[in-house]
Image (cartoon, grey):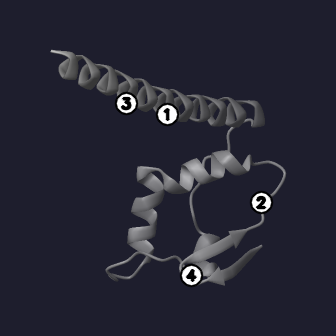
Amino acid sequence: MVGIIAGGILRLKVKNDINSEYLTLCINSIIGRMQAERDSGGSVIAHWKPEQIKNILIPILPKQTQQKIADLVQKSHEARKKAKELLEEAKQKVEELMEIL
């Protein structure tokens, strides 16, 4: 089921055979964005219409594989966040050392 919540925002109700995080990853992937551009009909900002959502090609992998992919992406987001925090901490320490010198 697809419903329009606001301009440019669609609410999707997924079936039990697909992990919602995995679906989000597929839609936001390069292939998903290419499909949006193809279906947008040449507009500057690509928006899918509810009837176009039904024609999106999503590889349906085993549920366990979908979950593994979703978990790996979540871990990568956490690692990126931690890396940014460590970088900021390192910058602060360098600035503190520069003030001492």
- Residue that label 1 marks: 81
* Residue at image coords 33%, 26%: 92
User: Reading the chain from its start, which is encountered first: label 4 or label 1?
Assistant: 4
**53 on left or right of 3:** left
Q: Nearer the viewer, mark 3 or mark 2?
A: 3
Q: Which mark, residue 49? A: 4
Q: Which mark, residue 14? A: 2
State the separation of the CA atoms marked 4 and 1.
34 Å
State the separation of the CA atoms marked 2 and 4.
17 Å
State the separation of the CA atoms marked 3 and 2.
39 Å
Residue density around tag 3, few if under 14, some if 14–19, many if 20 or more, within 10 Å:
few
Look at label 1 and name its amino acid: Lys
Quarter location, residue 87: top left
User: Reading the chain from its start, which is encountered first: label 3 or label 2?
Assistant: 2
Give the structural element (helix, strand or loop) at label 2.
loop
Identify which residue, 62 or 12, lies in the foreground: 12
